[in-house]
Image (tube, helix red, strand yellow):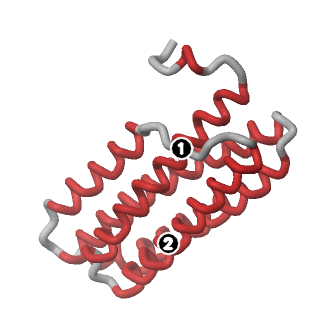
Amino acid sequence: MGFFSKDIKTLDDLFVHTLRDIYYAEKQIEKALPKMVDKATDPQLKAGFEKHLEQTKGHIERVEQVFELHGVKAKQVNCPAIDGILEEADDVSGDVDDKDVLDAALIASAQAVEHYEMTRYGTLIAWAKQLGRSDCANVLAKNLKEEQATDRKLTEIAESKINLQAAE
């Protein structure tokens, strides 16, 4: 049993805990994205990060809406996973001098973040449905859809030019 398991007895408890986890993650991502915007050198990548920063603000609002719908206080729990992903992203991008390789590193880091978010939202949606909370699931599905679209766009940018330029 994990260190927080004493507080989690039901699927509803687990749902709320994980909602608080993604709330923390989204807030940390909101803080990290401006640094990624500043570091990105490719205009399309920079614009993509700026767009995702705006989407992230909307994700936070939607998570807050789910807390309200579910009748629980909106609060965060520390998420060592996202902290680690963001710390690694900062470390890797801090060590790269070549601008094309830097952009490739930023994309890889951003996709690690996206994949974490997609797993969390997918799980939360499944649990919300199981708990009879299709209202919550529908709101969370909007975030998942945007995270998936961002991941696809990052892949497109990477495969169409950034990775090619970084390999030169």
Q: Which mark is residue 52?
A: 2
Quadrant holding the C terminus: bottom left
Q: Residues within 10 Å of mark 1 (few under 14, many from 20)?
A: some
Identify the amino acid type marked 2.
His
Across and down, in percent, residue 64 comes to 63, 54
Q: Please state if 166 lies on the left or on the right of 158 as rendered.
A: left
Across and down, in percent, residue 97 comes to 12, 70
- Give the residue drawn at x 43%, y 39%: 79
Q: Nearer the viewer, mark 1 or mark 2?
A: 1
Residue at far bottom of view = 43
Residue 15 vertical position relative to residue 28 in the rendered view, above or below: above
- Give the residue drawn at x 75%, y 43%: 70
Secondary element under disc 1, as helix, strand or loop, is loop
The quadrant where residue 133 appears: top right
Q: Please state if 142 lies on the left or on the right of 102 as rendered.
A: right
Identify the amino acid type marked 1.
Lys
**Dot 1 or dot 2, earlier in sequence:** 2
- Give the residue drawn at x 61%, y 62%: 61
Residue 166 vertical position relative to residue 142 in the rendered view, above or below: below
Across and down, in percent, residue 94 comes to 16, 61
Q: Nearer the viewer, residue 42 or 85?
A: 85
- Give the residue drawn at x 48%, y 17%: 2
Instruction: Kindly report the distance in space between the C-alpha atoms of the residues bearing marks 1 and 2.
Output: 22 Å
Secondary element under disc 2, as helix, strand or loop, is helix
**Residue at mark 1:** 75
Across and down, in percent, residue 44 comes to 41, 85
Q: Residues within 10 Å of mark 2 (few under 14, many from 20)?
A: some
Residue 148 in view: yes
Q: Which mark is residue 40?
A: none
